[in-house]
Image: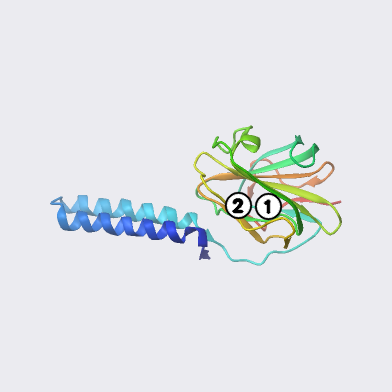
């Protein structure tokens, strides 16, 4: 387990605030001891909450071109046929995974191949489970073309608390299945759009692990 690079600056600021607040409380305020230690406990808890949000587990990805892996840790909240209007402009199977603030927020590619399309969209900050968040919230859309010619679209979506989407890919990049491609800060959602007929093995409300849980399989 390591700390993700997106958390370095935020954690330094948080640590400075914790130290500054407790220095002021213990040195300048004439409070009872129990009040001093209550402030210490609350501020340390605050720092640990932020620290756990940026944890980055280390593991080996079991690559399989016949499987689609979960892009993030979270819970499956949508499995349905829907019209994908940005790139494919036809019917696709949508699988959506919601991440709470306590989940690991590293984003991983569900399949390997070449990035054939990428676009960032500015937008709103509706709650991540809102039906319109997929088309109205701040988001990125990535399409990866696999060696067999099949294209898979996945979309980072900001939520009510997520005010920054980070990505590390661009069109033309070759990426491996399970590789890190982005990060969304403080709660969010990722949608995957698969060809109709793809065998979905995930279930609604299933807990997923990014880069490890199998979402779907090619027949």
**185 or 51, nearer to the observer:** 185
**Place of residue 76 in the rendered image (x, y in percent of width and height, measured from the top left):** 65, 43
Q: Secondary structure at mark 2?
A: loop
Q: Where does label 2 land, which residue?
A: 73
How busy is the neighbourhood of tag 1: few (under 14 within 10 Å), some, or many (20 plus)?
A: many
Asked whether, in this view, residue 86 is left or right of residue 44, the answer is: right
Q: Which mark is residue 70?
A: 1
Q: Quick one: SS at disc 1?
A: loop
Q: Residue at x 54, y 61 (%)?
A: 56
Name, please, the residue furthest toward the left.
30
**Left or right of residue 156: residue 11:** left
Q: How far is disc 2 from disc 1 in space, using C-alphas?
A: 7 Å
**Tag 2–tag 1 contact (CB < 8 Å):** yes
Q: Is residue 99 visible?
A: no
Q: Is 96 left or right of 16, judged from the image as shown? A: right
Instruction: Indicate the position of residue 35 as horizontal and vertical percent values.
Output: 21, 49
The foreground one among 101 and 23 is 23
Residue 30 x %, y % = 13, 51
């Amino acid at each position: 387990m390591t700390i993700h690079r997106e958390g370095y600056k935020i954690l330094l600021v948080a640590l400075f605030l914790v130290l500054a607040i407790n220095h002021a409380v213990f040195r300048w305020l004439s409070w009872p001891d129990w009040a001093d230690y209550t402030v210490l406990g609350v501020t340390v808890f605050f720092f640990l909450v932020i620290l756990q949000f940026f944890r980055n587990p280390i593991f080996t990805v079991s690559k399989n071109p016949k499987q689609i892996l979960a892009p993030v840790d979270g819970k499956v909240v949508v499995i349905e046929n829907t019209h994908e209007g940005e790139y494919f402009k036809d019917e696709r199977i949508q699988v959506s995974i919601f991440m709470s603030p306590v989940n690991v927020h590293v984003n991983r590619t569900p399949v390997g191949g070449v990035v054939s399309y990428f676009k960032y969209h500015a937008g709103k900050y509706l709650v991540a489970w809102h039906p319109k968040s997929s088309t109205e919230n701040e988001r990125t859309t990535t399409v990866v073309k696999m060696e067999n010619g099949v294209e898979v679209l996945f979309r980072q979506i900001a939520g009510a608390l997520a005010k920054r989407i980070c990505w590390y890919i661009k069109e033309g990049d070759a990426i491996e299945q399970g590789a890190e491609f982005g990060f969304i800060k403080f709660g969010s959602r990722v949608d995957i759009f698969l060809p109709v007929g793809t065998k979905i093995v995930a279930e609604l409300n299933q807990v997923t692990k990014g880069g490890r849980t199998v979402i779907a399989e090619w027949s």
